[in-house]
């Protein structure tokens, strides 16, 4: 009984807080970090991330009286669960309250019933990894629905889904599928109302096959990606017409889960063969199964119409699409322009469409026009040859032929506007084999064949496996020279900052024990050295380093907000942000977020999450952006640029192939080099090259048999040598113990340092007492094949350079 009373009390208290925060700007006085501009940006981003999937003219709701069904109108899901969502927001705006405060006339009798029932039946939000996927619905009888229909002329049915870290969504009612209660609610409402609008409150793609079942009885469908603390206001703005929807899908919605090319190779505990290879998401559907798509990648409707007049030009190895966009309707709105290409059929299999760039117009009034442009290098259309089929192994190659350019508002509607001719095969980048599949674990990958009508059908071929040997000699050839130890000569990090000493001189005076301390965090989350509620602290983790001026650097979880003990803004989920297709807006939002970080005294935000949405069941898809690496990379680059413009640091994650939560710390992602580079690493590469993040986080999982936090092919060869990353690489929280297969003197933290993964976070190894640190690094130092002084100094230098470059959060 006491537990039920506590839940009831907590539920009532939450509703009181939500109700008091109807005018969210009033909170500015309560928390100076929560300024009016930040609130406005959160609302704008959440609004632009809403995707209108169907509309027969019912929306926007003007001069309409509506009955709202579904408990989630009150218990609105504003973000997912886990480290990416467990922010302490100052308020959460639910949909019912937002609608009441809008120009929409809400049926108060039904609304009062839902408020009373939800208050009396509070949701049980479970515990870590065991959160609910959905909430039980209020029982509905036919008389209630029929009575509401006599008082109103339209219905809104709100259906919610939750997702979270450390677990996947399930192919069960209440998770991926509708429950019987939800089906009954839809059946009852559509039987009584001539106009029914469905609002899907979710962070992940869910089954929508029921749309065909209910047919035109459902007038409109709004995909309301979870929009953070301003979520309710954002959806109400779209429903009421205060805002014109301009969001676009960043993932394909298929007819059935079984239609996704990953369905047979997702969620396995030990390993997953990425057998679909480069044919992820729309690359598969548009090539092989266009008839299995309910809503294509890039799709989204508006309350107005647009005409687009594109022209393509190619000069100086750059493709430029220039388009004049005119609002031909009666309402102001924004329009997204997407450019795609189709590579010629050659030695390498090619999808029918690949995104090359996108842009979004400003708000255009009726009759107004804007000329926009999308540019990308010709080399972006090159494909990675991991087999030598083109005669150029381990290289990006433009095969000879016609590269068709398409422009449109989604992948399906894009039409050809021009072409670029490559007269002879051209190598655009010659690289080396890296992270190739293990010959001990061969698998088949998808390719294609064509019938006489050029229709592609799936075919299969052996995935090329690792051919390059000699890792030991390659690693030894790259070992850095150490700086001779001088002992403490009184140089502080402040002296280096002031130009009175070099960083090399400072590092030379550090003992091996101090160097070791710089390669790990302060052992635990919520370190007493950092702001309360922090995810961990690195840098000045021991007193002798702090005496030398090395600060304790605070990290905090993201990406939906600053996860601290203090209140902080709760941003829209990652999918919502990407669905805006508006990178300037996201950069401005992120810059304000960075200012809030400084006010909250944190230095590194563990954000953005940018793994590919490979399969719709992945539990953390809500934190990520898209099934497409261009959308993921451009979105992440905007967010990183914004955060770091405020003088703090972003930390993109999780490098790489963290595409499921099932057994994530031991699972092996087995993927071809081509798919790895073209799909799973390309977004990270765009982010690194365009925005220069100061920190990067590795993933938990293995990539072709090697854990990411030991993977020198990934971190040294690709991230640092190819992409030019010169910042700090940290682990995801804790890591697996392992022996280096080529160096008997290396294991665990010594193995990690040789791979140039600089910092173990939060700093301790699982199984150790909190007051103990792992000894594997210093035990290796001085041994045959052991970690060298130069390697420890290299990682320490990366950390210290970071400490010098990020202003302290004291303002």
Image: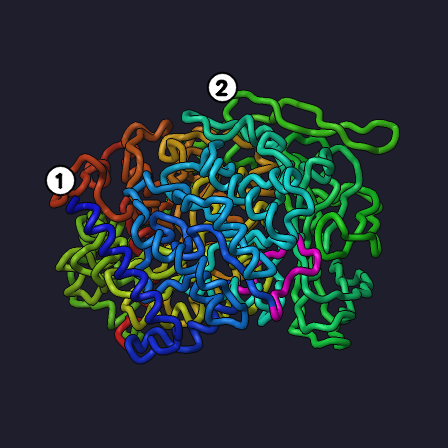
Image quadrant occupied by the C terminus: bottom left
Residue 45 appears in the figure: no
Q: Residue at x 34, y 65 (%)?
A: 18
The span picked out in magenta is 47-63
Q: In the visual, does 31 lie left or right of 133?
A: left
Q: In the visual, does 555 lie left or right of 6?
A: right
Residue 234 rendering spot, x and y as whole percentages: 50, 65
Instruction: Report the disc number at residue 143.
Output: none
Identify the mark nearer the N-term, 2 or 1: 2
The quarter holding residue 48 reads bottom right
Q: Residue at x 68, y 73 (%)?
A: 332
Can you say whether 474 is above or below 652 in the image? above
Residue ID for mark 1: 769
State the residue in front, 71 or 301. Answer: 71
Q: Residue at x 53, y 39 (%)?
A: 183
- Asked if the residues shown at circle 2 and circle 1 are in contact, with their CB atoms under 8 angstroms apart, the answer is no
Q: Residue 497 lies in magenta, yes or no?
A: no
- Determine the CA span between mark 2 and mark 1: 38 Å
Residue ID for mark 2: 440
State the residue in front, 546 or 418. Answer: 418
Crowding at dot 1, Cα within 10 Å, few <14 / some 14-19 / many 20+, comes out as: few
Residue 3 rendering spot, x and y as whole percentages: 18, 45
Image quadrant occupied by the N terminus: top left
State the residue in front, 112 or 726. Answer: 112
Residue 105 rendering spot, x and y as whole percentages: 53, 68
């Amino acid at each position: 009984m006491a537990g039920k009373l506590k839940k009831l009390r907590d539920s009532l208290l939450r509703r009181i807080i939500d109700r008091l925060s109807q005018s969210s700007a009033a909170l500015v006085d309560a928390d100076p970090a929560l300024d009016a501009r930040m609130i406005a940006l959160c609302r704008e981003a959440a609004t632009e991330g809403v995707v209108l999937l169907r509309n027969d003219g019912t929306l926007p709701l003007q001069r309409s009286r509506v009955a709202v069904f579904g408990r989630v109108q009150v218990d609105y899901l504003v973000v997912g669960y886990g480290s990416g969502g467990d922010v302490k927001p100052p308020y959460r705006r639910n949909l019912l309250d937002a609608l009441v405060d809008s120009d929409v006339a809400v049926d108060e009798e039904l609304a009062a019933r839902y408020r009373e029932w939800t208050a009396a039946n509070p949701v049980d939000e479970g515990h870590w990894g065991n959160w609910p996927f959905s909430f039980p619905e209020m029982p509905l009888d036919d008389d209630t629905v029929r009575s509401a229909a006599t008082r109103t002329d339209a219905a809104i049915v709100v259906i919610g889904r939750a997702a979270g870290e450390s677990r996947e969504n399930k192919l069960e009612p209440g998770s991926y599928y509708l429950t019987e209660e939800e089906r009954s609610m839809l059946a009852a409402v559509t039987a009584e109302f001539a106009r029914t609008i469905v609002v899907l409150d979710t962070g992940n793609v869910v089954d929508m096959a029921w749309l065909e079942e209910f047919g035109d009885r459902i007038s409109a469908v709004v995909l309301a990606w979870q929009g953070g603390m301003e979520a309710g206001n954002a959806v109400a703005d779209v429903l009421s017409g205060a805002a014109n929807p301009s969001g676009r899908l960043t993932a394909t919605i298929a007819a059935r889960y079984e239609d996704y090319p990953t369905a047979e190779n997702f969620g396995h505990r030990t390993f997953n063969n990425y057998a679909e290879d480069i044919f992820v998401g729309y690359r598969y559907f548009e090539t092989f199964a266009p008839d299995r798509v309910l809503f294509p990648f890039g799709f989204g409707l508006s309350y107005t119409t647009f005409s687009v007049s594109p022209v393509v030009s190619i000069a100086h190895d750059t493709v430029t699409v220039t388009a004049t966009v005119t609002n031909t309707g009666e309402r102001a709105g924004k329009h997204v322009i997407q450019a795609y290409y189709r590579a010629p059929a050659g030695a390498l299999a090619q999808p029918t469409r690949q995104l090359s760039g996108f842009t979004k117009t400003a708000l255009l009034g009726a009759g107004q026009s804007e000329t926009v442009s999308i540019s990308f290098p010709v080399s972006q259309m090159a494909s990675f040859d991991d087999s030598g089929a083109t005669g150029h192994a381990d290289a990006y190659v433009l095969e000879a032929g016609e590269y068709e350019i398409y422009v449109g508002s989604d992948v399906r509607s894009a039409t050809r506007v021009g072409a670029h001719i490559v007269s002879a095969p051209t190598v655009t980048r010659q690289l080396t084999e890296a992270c190739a599949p293990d010959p001990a674990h061969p698998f088949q990958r998808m390719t294609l064949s064509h019938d006489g009508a050029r229709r592609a059908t799936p075919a299969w071929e052996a995935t090329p496996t690792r051919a390059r040997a000699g890792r030991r000699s390659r690693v030894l050839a790259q070992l850095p020279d150490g700086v001779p130890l001088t002992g403490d000569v009184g140089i502080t990090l402040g002296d280096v900052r002031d130009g009175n000493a070099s960083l090399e001189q400072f590092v030379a005076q550090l003992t091996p024990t101090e160097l070791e301390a710089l390669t790990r965090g302060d052992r635990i989350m919520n370190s007493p050295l950092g702001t309360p509620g922090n995810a961990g602290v690195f840098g000045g983790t021991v007193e002798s380093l702090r005496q030398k001026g090395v600060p304790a650097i605070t990290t905090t979880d993201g990406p939906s907000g600053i996860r601290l003990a203090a209140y902080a803004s709760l941003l829209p989920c990652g999918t919502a942000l990407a669905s805006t297709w508006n990178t300037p807006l996201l950069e401005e939002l992120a810059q304000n977020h960075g200012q809030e970080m400084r006010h909250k005294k944190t230095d590194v935000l563990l954000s953005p999450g940018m793994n590919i949405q490979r399969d719709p069941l992945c539990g953390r898809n809500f934190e990520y952006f898209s099934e497409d690496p261009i959308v993921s990379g451009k979105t992440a680059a905007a967010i990183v640029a914004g955060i770091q413009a405020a003088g703090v640091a972003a930390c993109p994650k999780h490098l790489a192939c963290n595409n499921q939560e099932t057994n994530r710390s031991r699972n092996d992602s087995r993927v071809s080099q081509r798919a790895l580079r073209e799909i799973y690493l390309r977004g990270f590469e765009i982010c690194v090259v365009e925005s220069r993040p100061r920190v990067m986080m590795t993933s938990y999982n293995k990539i072709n048999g090697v854990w990411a936090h030991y993977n020198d092919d990934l971190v040294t060869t690709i991230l640092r040598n190819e992409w030019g990353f010169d910042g700090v690489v940290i682990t995801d929280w804790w890591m697996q113990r392992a022996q280096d297969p080529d160096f008997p003197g290396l294991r665990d933290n010594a193995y990690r340092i040789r791979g140039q993964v600089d910092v173990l976070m939060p700093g301790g190894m699982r199984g150790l007492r909190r007051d103990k640190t792992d000894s594997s690094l210093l035990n290796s130092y001085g041994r045959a094949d052991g970690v060298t002084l130069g390697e420890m100094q290299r990682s320490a230098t990366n950390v210290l350079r970071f400490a010098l470059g990020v202003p302290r959060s004291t303002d």
